[in-house]
Amino acid sequence: MKRFLLVLLVLLLGWIGYERENLWAFPDIISAYTAKEYCSCRYVMNNDAEYCRGYVKQWLPTSGFADESASKTITVSGMGRTNKAQWLSERQGCRLNP
């Protein structure tokens, strides 16, 4: 049994090493997805704020959320990362800001 657990641990650590870039990028996905999708829902599709908040809700919660309606900029923080999306125009829609 101990040998099996040791082999399983070695395999798990090998997989983590192999997928390290993807695992490192994962926290950015939460806040980026939420900012971009909310911006599109709110300012491209012209839905109300309450509906769009429900639309982008995920099982991993965000720690910060700001909808600056004057500049049509959405700022979302989650898992230690912050991303912004801004509405550009009807033709271009929303874009993630670096």
Image (spheres, helix red, strand yellow):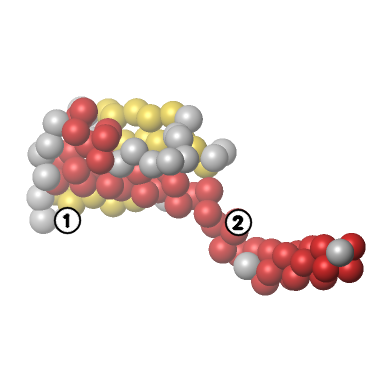
Quarter holding residue 8: bottom right
In x, y percent, where is residue 62?
45, 34
Please report the residue visible at 53 percent of the width from the left and 48 percent of the height from the top: 27
Mark closer to the observer (1, 2)? 2
Find residue 51 and report its image quarter.
top left
Instruction: Write down the quadrant of residue 67 in the picture.
Output: top left
Label 1: which secondary element = loop
Mark 1 and mark 2: Cα distance apart in space: 30 Å
Q: In this view, does 65 lie above or below 1?
A: above
23 relative position to 35: left or right: right
Q: Where is residue 53 in the image (x, y as percent from the top left)?
A: 27, 33
Q: In which quarter of the image is the N terminus?
A: bottom right
- Asked whether 57 or 1 is in front, the reply is 1
Query: Does the residue at mark 1 contact the one at mark 2 (Cβ under 8 Å)?
Result: no
Which residue sits at x=59%, y=59%?
Answer: 23
Helix, strand, or loop for circle 2?
Answer: helix
User: What x and y, as percent, mark residue 13?
Assistant: 76, 64
Q: Tell me if 57 is positioned left or right of 60 in this view.
A: left
Which residue lies under the disc numbered 1?
Answer: 92
Q: Can residue 39 be seen in this view?
A: yes
Q: Mark 2 points at which residue?
A: 24
Looking at the image, the residue that sits furthest to the right is 2
The answer to whether residue 73 shows anywhere in this view is no
Q: Label 2 sits on what residue type?
A: Trp
User: Which badge, 1 or 2, comes first in the chain's sequence?
Assistant: 2
Q: Of all residues shown, which one is farthest toward the front?
A: 1
Dot 2, crowdedness within 10 Å: few (<14), some or many (≥20)?
few
Q: Residue 39: x, y in percent?
A: 24, 42
Give the residue displayed 21% in from the left and 46% down from the top. 40
Q: Amino acid type of disc 1?
A: Gln
In the image, residue 78 above or below residue 2? above
